[in-house]
Amino acid sequence: MKVKKKVVFVCQSCGNESGKWFGKCPACGEWNSAVEEERRKTADRWVEDRRELRQPRRLSDIEDAELERSEVGIGEFDRVLGGGLVPGELVLVGGDPGIGKSTLLLQVLSRLAENGKAGFYVSGEESEAQTRMRAGRLGTLSGELYVSCETDVNVILNQLSELKVSAAVIDSIQTVYNPELAGAPGSVGQIRECGLRFLNFAKAHSTALFLVGHVTKEGAVAGPRVLEHMVDVVLYLEGERYQNYRVLRAAKNRFGSTNEIGVFEMREMGLVEVLDPSRVFLSERDSRAPGSVVVSSIEGTRPLLVELQALVSSSGYSFPQRAATGYDSKRLSVLLAVLEKRIGLKLGAADVFVNVAGGIRLDEPGSDLGLVVAVASSYRNTAVKPHTAVAGEVGLGGEVRRVAQIEQRVKEATKLGFERIIIPSGSIPDVSHKGRIDIVGVDDVRSAVQHALEKTGSGEKS
C-alpha cells in the first residue's frame, strides 16, 4: 500500500495546522509555538465504512429519551458528574502530578466492578505489577476489574472491543500513540488523533471512557485545547500536594452543572469523601485572630462555609504587594479600591495578602463582603465578632447587593452553630425560616464593617 507523507506545522497552544511555518499563530496569536510534524496517511477504509453505518435522520423523528445515568457509588464523584455516568461519556481528568487522579479513578472502576459493571484500567506509565500493588493498598482488587499496560491506541481499542466493559480509564492520554503518525507520544497530533479515536469508540459502543491528562504550570491540560472541546466532561482535581484535602471541580459538563464540587480527603487507603466540608474547613480556625472571617458561599447546589483570611501590613517596597491564594487577584484589587474610596482605609502603601483556608477557591460574587470584612479587620487589628458569618456581593459604589440561594446559606450557618449572619438587606425577605440565628441586614460596606467588627482595638487607624 502506498504511503503518503506530509509535513505540517502545528501550534502547540491551540492545535492549528498550516502547510508552512509561522512565527505567530493566526488562530490564537501565540508566538514561536509552531512545531513541525510529519503525517503519514494510508487509504482509510474505516471512513468509507462509517458512511454506511448511519444515515442522516430528521430531528423530529428521534425519540426524546432521558439520560440513563449509572451511579458510581462515590457520592462526591457522582455529584460533580451530575448524578452519575452517562453511557458513551468521554471524560477528561486533569490535575497536578501526584494529586491523586489515578487513585481516584482506580477507586471509581473498583466501585463499578463491585456493582457488577466490568472496568478496564489502561496504564501507560506503570507496569501491571505496580498497578496491582497500588490496587492492593487501596483495597480495589475487584474481580471484574481488568488492567493492561499498553500505549498503542489500536491495541487498546481492540482490547476494549473484546472485553466489552462499561467504563475504562486511559492513564494517561499523553502516553498513547498511533503508529500511523510520525509524531512522538504526547505531541499535538498524537493527542488529537488518539482522543478522536477514543471519542468515536465511546459513542459507538456506549462505553464511558476517562482520559487522564497532565497539566501545565499554568493549570491547563497539556496538549491542544481542542481535546477539551472534544470531550463531554472536563474535571480538575485540585489541592496542595502536602495537604490532605482535594477538590474535584467540573470545568465543562455537557450532562450536568459546572458549579458542583466534590471534596475528598487523602488517606492511606485512598481518597475518602468529606460529607460535611464546612465543619472540616472551620475546625482549625482561630476565631479571635484579626483578619479572619467565615464566608457563606454556594458551590453548585451546596452551601459551603469557609474561612477567608486577610493580612494587611505596611509595605517596604515602592509598589505594595497584592497576593491572593484561592481568590481572584483582579477582584481583590477592585475591592481594595472600594474600601479605600468608600470607607477611607489607607491601603495604597500597604501589602495585602489573602488566603482561603482548606485549598478551596472562591469564585462567586457572594464572597465579596467576606473579603471586605477580613481586610478591614486586619487593617484595624480588630477581630470579627464571635460566631458571625457573612455573605454578600459588593458593588463599586460600596453598596451590598443581593446574592442567590440566601436561605441555604443561612441554614448552613445555623447548622454549624453560628449565632449571627450579615447579609444584604434586600435578601432578608428571601429568608422564610430564620431559625435560631440573628440575621443582620446591611446596605453598604461601611455598615457591614461596623456590624461585623468588635469594638476598635489599639490598632485602629480609621
Image: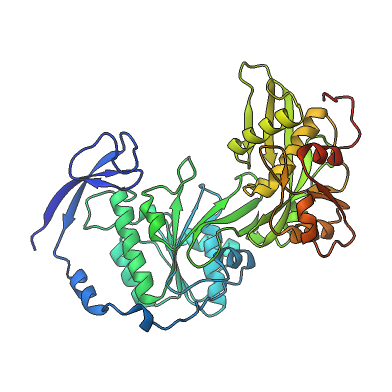
Q: Residue at x 66, y 37 (%)?
A: 396
Colour mapping? rainbow
Q: Is 162 situated above or below 181? A: below
Residue 142: image location, x then y, percent: 54, 73
Along the viewing direction, whichever of 136 and 209 lies nearer the viewer:
209
Q: Tell me, yes or no, if residue 267 can be seen here.
A: no
Left or right of residue 297, residue 363 in this image = left
Q: Tell me, yes or no, if residue 278 can be seen here.
A: yes
Q: Residue at x 23, y 37 (%)?
A: 22
Q: Quadrant of the N terminus?
A: bottom left
Along the viewing direction, whichever of 63 and 124 lies nearer the viewer:
63
Residue 45: image quadrant is: bottom left
| Residue, far left | 2
Residue 116: image location, x then y, percent: 53, 80
Residue 375: image quadrant is: top right
Left or right of residue 359, residue 421 in this image = right
Q: Quadrant of the C terminus?
A: top right
* Total number of numbered discs in the rendering: 0
Left or right of residue 39, residue 291 in this image = right
Along the viewing direction, whichever of 228 and 283 lies nearer the viewer:
228
Residue 291: image location, x then y, percent: 78, 35
Residue 156: image location, x then y, percent: 34, 66
Q: Residue at x 35, y 61 (%)?
A: 150
